[in-house]
Image: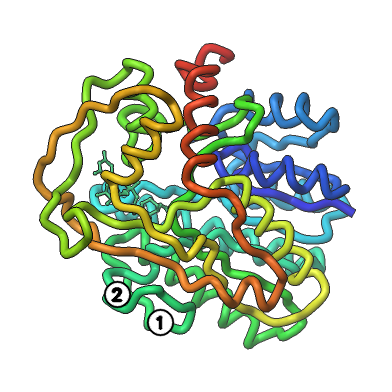
Amino acid sequence: MAILVTGGAGFIGCHTCIELLQAGYEVIVIDNFSNSYPESLNRVMDLTEQKIRIYDIDLLDKSSLDTVFIENNIEAVIHFAGLKAVGESVAFPLTYYQTNIMSTIYLCETMKKHHVKNLVFSSSATVYGNTEKVPISEEVRLSAMNPYGRTKIMIEQILKDLYQSDPSWGMALLRYFNPIGAHPSGEIGENPNGIPNNLMPYITQVAIGLREELMIFGNDYPTKDGTGIRDYIHVVDLAKGHVKALEKALTKTGIEAYNLGTGKGYSVLEVVAAFEAASGKVIPYKIVDRRPGDVAISLAKVTKAKREFDWIATRGIEEMCRDAWNWQTKNPQGYKLME
Ligand code: WQD
């Protein structure tokens, strides 16, 4: 029996493929490589010395999607594939609704047709909007601030309605906080196209000399040093959480949302300091205006995942920074050179 991983060539997807293979699962990947590189999967196969069956297709291509289920004995699906840039979603909302929502509907229709009813969905803490209640528990009212976040809320609702119509499904909705870091081998890591939106890849590109200085978006937030606080989680911890959530979705019907975070927050300046200590590099920075849509603090309540599938993040900020830097130094241009 195999696990189908959609978007398996992406940052979190390829780290999850490693954990699945090392847990003994057979892995099938669907990816259209619109925002990822086949090289990431080559490296996963090298690192694990195991094969992955790869389908270079778009989930909106229903007939090709059906073929994947016909050709493989799929037991469950981990669904990462989708667009995820907040700013881009404001500029191109229709593309985000079509890509993220329609592809999930086509996926679920195809799963249902082939009697595959175990699904782990890649959601995001962005569904919490700018809630003031931290740490944030899964029961908080959802309220996204942008089309990207709204696609995640809508998809979660679609999956809940699907479960209401057919309670034989087993589903886990995983709300990630801020995934950073890389596999300790340095062979796979975060490989954003163009100018990084997120903090850590921007920092590593400054450290390696690709960018001149870090722009810190505001230091007038109501936090210890005025800069934004986030719940950073090592991508390997996050990947391991997917395997645990999968095992639960495989053994128990139902649909539940889980926070995947550490429950510990770091400010931007604290991340900069931790990165400088881990890398030995100085990160020049400039304080600029707040970024529209940013919240002051985002922090996970993490008891539910521990209680329900015995998962907890174990890697600290030093290891996150060290592994992010190791990836960047070993791959100054990311996977590009390998294309
Ligand atoms: C972290 C902190 C910024 C860049 C985003 C998405 C969210 C999810 C995770 C997909 C904030 C500050 C950042 C920079 C900075 N993605 N910052 N200078 O915004 O918490 O979450 O990624 O699901 O949907 O919103 O992460 O890394 O962009 O920002 O000062 O160049 O770093 O203000 O305080 P964020 P981030």
Amino acid type of the residue that numbered disc 2 sits on in the rendered structure: Thr
- Per the rendering, the mark at residue 140 is 1
Is residue 284 something one can see in this rendering?
yes
Asked whether 188 or 322 is in front, the reply is 322
- Per the rendering, the mark at residue 11 is none
Please give the count of numbered marks on the rendered protein.
Answer: 2
Tell me which colouring the rendered structure shows: rainbow
What is the CA distance from the residue labelled 1 to the residue labelled 2? 8 Å
Residue at 73% from the left image edge and 62% from the top image edge: 244
Q: Secondary structure at mark 2?
A: loop
- Per the rendering, the mark at residue 131 is 2
Residue at 80% from the left image edge and 32% from the top image edge: 48
* Residue 191 in the figure: left or right of residue 133: right
* Residue 123 in the figure: left or right of residue 167: left
* Residue 269 in the figure: left or right of residue 320: left
Specify the farthest residue to the top: 337
Question: How many other residues sit within 10 Å of disc 2, few (<14), some (14-19) or many (≥20)?
Answer: some
Q: Is mark 2 within 8 Å of ligand 1?
A: no
Question: How many other residues sit within 10 Å of disc 1, few (<14), some (14-19) or many (≥20)?
Answer: few
Asked whether 13 or 7 is in front, the reply is 13
Q: Quadrant of the C terminus?
A: top right
Residue at 41% from the left image edge and 74% from the top image edge: 136
Q: Are marks 1 and 2 in contact (CB under 8 Å)?
A: yes
Q: Is residue 128 above or below residue 217?
A: below
Q: Quadrant of residue 47?
A: top right
Q: Secondary structure at mark 1?
A: loop
Is residue 92 something one can see in this rendering?
no
Residue at 68% from the left image edge and 53% from the top image edge: 240
Q: Quadrant of the N terminus?
A: bottom right
Q: Is mark 1 within 8 Å of ligand 1?
A: no
Asked whether 311 or 20 is in front, the reply is 311
